[in-house]
Amino acid sequence: MNAELEARAASARERMGELADAGVEAVACGFVDPAGIVRTKCIPLRRLVEATRSGIGLSTVFALALSNDEFTSAPGYVEGPSGDLRLVPDPGGIVPVEPMPGWAWAPVDQFTQEGERWAGCPRSFLRRVVDDLAARGLTVRAAFEFEFSFGRDMPDGSVEPAHRGPGYSDIALVQHHDLALDLIRAFEREGLEVQQFHPEYTDGQFEVSIAPRDPIAMADTVLVLKQTVRAVGRKYGWRASFSPRTFGPVGNGMHLHLSLWRDGLNEFSGGDGPAGLRREGEAFIAGLHRDLPAVVAVTCPNTLSYSRLQPHHWSGAMLCWGQENREAALRFIQGMAGTRSQSANIEVKPIDGTSNPYLAMGAVLAAGAAGVADGLELPDPTTEDPSSLPEEERTHRGIRQLPSSLAEAVEELAASSTLRAAMGDLLFETFLATRRADEAQYAGMEEEELTRQFRWRY
């Protein structure tokens, strides 16, 4: 057994007593497939140490999973059911799921049977990107805003949302104050550190923001939070959906907030660059700006994602950046005067809950890191609604709409040398194959039917 697995086994032994004292009897070991669906294999708590040593078996074909539970192929990489991986829980990331008594959630890395990290593992990809930044003396703090909807199927075939607004209203909150409090209480007991919670804009929709943490821990948090939301909703007779379109014209996003740090200083504040950016902070955002058309194939990987990724949906459909511009794909947030050295961050808006959080976070950070390596500079910021500008003006300023379909985004991804280099050929090619196959499955389907297809799959 290699040193990493030995260390995990030792950590698992240390946590066994703590988890047992918390009432944990079983551990759900979670991974996310290329279509963004969270999959699990479960073990009794007594098997935790053994699982960290030898893993839990999983077919390599899950690297080719589609959103409808079918599989595709990636010739030369993964082509069929032959081959086995080992899911190895990370004991440091195990969290008891508060609304599911007796259960804990564990993030996993995918290893080969030889005990080495598998090249197609999304969590290991994110770790490589984080480690590469650390080797340059840079660290990242990351946080997601989670939008989700509650609803239920009715006997007549219709779907009832949990509330009908108004958006952000006390009416919607009072209607579900007990559910909201149960969610906040659960998140806090799980250590997720809620920043804010509110009913959102469209029918049945809510939003919660979680405190920043390191990128791997933040991606792990996505899995814990989704499980918690589903479990609390079930208690009240509601189904939860993180689909990009659930009810009404406004969909669910999962906006990502990032700040870049060197030697304890926020590279997004205190500099002499645009909006107070330091040099590396500007280059990081510029790299993301350059590669964003390819990145959206990873952050918005579902056919239905592009129904939401449209102008005037606050989804960041236009390739530009701007200070507090909610129609820009990259919204720069300085924060309140006196707090900017800590709070300044960039919000990446074109991302939704159908994404694999490890792949999405990794792709975003890889693009930013490439910008730092290349010493890029940002174009001028956009203060207007970018889609309202005359076409000639947009062209002159380099503003354009991001891909408006999965097919278009996939071709941008296929041409991206930045993401291929960061992901490695196996992960890049298998992911690309699944996105092409998923797009072909649903080509030509009407938006209403797509909404129905994906409402309860995410």
Image (tube, rainbow, N blue to C red):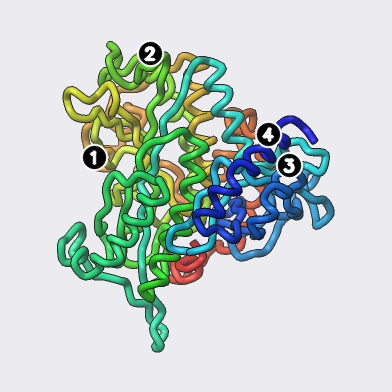
Q: N-terminal of the two: label 3 or label 2?
A: 3
Look at the numbered disc 1 and give the secondary structure of its residue: loop
Q: Which residue is mark 1?
A: 385
Q: N-terminal of the two: label 4 or label 1?
A: 4
313 w.r.t. 177: above or below: above
Residue 111 - label: 3
Look at the numbered disc 3 and give the secondary structure of its residue: strand
Horizontally, residue 281 falls left or right of residue 434, namely left
Q: Specify the farthest residue to the top.
A: 272
Look at the numbered disc 4 and give the secondary structure of its residue: helix
Q: N-terminal of the two: label 3 or label 1?
A: 3
Where does the image place residue 448, in percent across and percent down from the top left? 42, 70
Q: Which residue is mark 2?
A: 279
2 w.r.t. 35: above or below: above
Where does the image place residue 362, in percent across and percent down from the top left? 54, 35
Tell me which amino acid carries mark 2. Arg
Q: N-terminal of the two: label 3 or label 4?
A: 4
Look at the numbered disc 2 and give the secondary structure of its residue: helix
Residue 126 in which image quadrant? top right
Tell me which amino acid carries mark 4. Ala
Tell me which amino acid carries mark 3. Phe
Q: Nearer the viewer, residue 362 or 406?
A: 362
Q: Which residue is mark 4?
A: 7
